[in-house]
Each structure stands twice: as structure tokens, then as C-alpha cells.
Amino acid sequence: MKGPVAVRRCHLLPLLCLTTVLLSFAHFIYWKTGSDVLRQDDAPKRSDALKQHVMDTCKQLSLPTNLSGETLSHMHYDDSRKVIYCFIPKVACTSWKRVWFKMTGMLKPGKDENSLDRTTVHTVLPLLANAKDKEEKLRTYKKFMLVRHPAVRVLSAYRDKLENADKVSLYNFHKMIGKKIEMKYRGTNAGSGHNVTFPEFIRFISEPGGGTAEQRNEHWLPMHTLCSPCSVHYDFIGKFEHLKEDSEYLLKWLGVTDLISEFPAADRPFQAKSHVSKYYGQLSVKETVAFHTKYKSDFLLFNYTYM
């Protein structure tokens, strides 16, 4: 694959080249979504290719194969269909949880899944972590997950939880996280948490190491940490970039098209993809490097590229 001019000239001016490439990453992020043909029938082919890529990358990078502590608490299961869904916040998980309510019979007769309030959607469904036979289910049930470009997912989380007020959330992100970010980087106790800048947010979540509970919040915790694809064999891995096609295929795969004719639309849509250049263009080279380092495994595992 031919890279940008800056990359091709790296052997001449290594330091200048690195700086140029990193600045390019800060302003232009490119995500590879595979074939340009987005038919529903292509969903299993894309998934198979991505699953093989994940397996190869796990081996090449010698990534941990132990099951992450977060993974079992991010899995919903359906005993009747013997299937497990590993949900990742900011990857259409609210819509998929609405589907889960309908297909598992937890929705009251005559009630539409879109009428469920967000608190119920995110707190009522049973988690695999609490199942007595979790190991058996994990070993024998079909499993699927969906992923999203790391930069777009993180931007969506920032916009949803810190830049805009989330009045219906059980968790006050401004008070519990935003205020700590402002205090950390501004050295003041006067911050309300409502004015966290995007560079401050990126610096906060990209710090090396395990991080604090706030830095490890599920809305921006790397996807491979949440769903452990190097230790869990997923039967289907879809992409947010093909959400309509992959979700329609999954509804048929799950055998629930008689219950759900159409995948639920997002109740708070935000087209983060179209704002990538604006937000990531605010980052310094150091912040860009830190972000890419933190999310490197997500970029590589799920075959997303940047430039």
C-alpha cells in the first residue's frame, strides 16, 4: 500500500518525517472499512476476515490471552438461543440492548423496545458475570461483538458525556470525572467539570499504566480490554461502520426477525465521524502520540488505520 509522501521520505529525514506523520494523524484520521460494497450478504465475509485478522494480530503482538475482568460484566446472554453479546459503550450498545429486551421476553407485551428509558436499558439485563454456569455458557454459546474506529468512539464519548450535558445518566460525568480533569490540569478547585477541553480529555484517558477508575470508564476503555478478543472466540465481529448491514444480518442469524423487523435507531444520534478533523486537530504531537499508544491494540486488532 502506498503511503503519504511524508512516509515515503522517512529514510531521508527521520525526525521531521515522524513529526509530519504525527501531525497528519492529528488532523486526518482514516478508517478502513473493507469492501466498498455494503450488502447485507457481505456481513459474514467481512466478519470472517476480521476474525482471522484478530487471531493473527493476537499472535503477532503476543497480546494477553487471559480473560479481562471487565469482559464478563460486559456480556449479556440468552439461554433460549444460546448466544452471548459483548457490548461496548458507544458502539450502538443501547440499540442492541433494546433488541435484547425484546428477544429475551423481558419486554412487557404490547410495549415497544424504543419506549424503554435509558436507565432501564442499561441496568436491568442479566450479565454473564452473575450467572452460576458462566464458564459453560462462555464455552458453548455463540458469541458476537461490534467495534468502532477508536478515534471516533472516543470522540463520541467526549461529546456525549463531557461536552454536552447528560441529564438522563445515573452517573454525573461532569461532577465525577470532568471536575477531576479540570483540577488535574488546571490546578484549581474551582472547576465545575463542564468545561473540559478535548485535549485535556485525551491527555487524561491516554496516560500510561492501568489508570484510575475514571480513566478506565467503560465509555472510553479500549475495546479489546472490554471484550477480550484474544481469549474469547467470537463467532461474529461486526463494525459500526457497517452497522445497518451487520445488524440486519445478526437479526437473521439470531432468528429474531419475526420479533424485530428493523434494528432500533439511536435515540441520541451524533455523527462523530464528521467532526474528527475538528477535534483531533486540536491535539499536540505529544497528545497524539499518547492517544495512539494507548489505543494501539484496538487500531491493530480491528484493522483500523490512521495517517
Image (cartoon, rainbow, N blue to C red):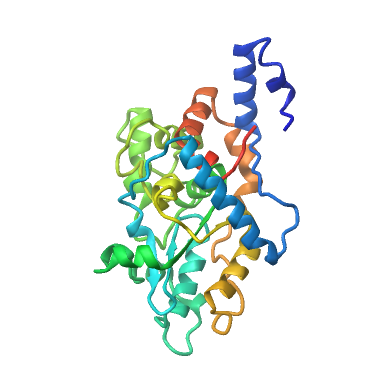
Which part of the image, by quadrant, shows the N terminus?
top right
* Residue at 75% in and 52% down: 36
* Residue at 60% in and 31% down: 26
Between residue 38 and residue 229, name the one nearer to us: 229
- Position above or below: 112 against 139: below
Residue 70 seen in the figure: yes
Between residue 279 and residue 175, name the one nearer to us: 279
Query: On the picture, is 294 further left or further right than 307?
Result: left
Occupied quadrant, residue 85: bottom left
* Residue at 55% in and 42% down: 151
* Residue ranking furthest to the bottom: 109
* Residue ranking furthest to the left: 132
Residue 197 seen in the figure: no
Occupied quadrant, residue 244: bottom right
* Percent coordinates x, y for residue 209 in the rendering: 34, 32
> How many labels sit on residues?
0
Which part of the image, by quadrant, shows the C terminus?
top right
* Percent coordinates x, y for residue 265 in the rendering: 59, 68
* Percent coordinates x, y for residue 76 in the rendering: 39, 67
* Percent coordinates x, y for residue 176 in the rendering: 32, 47
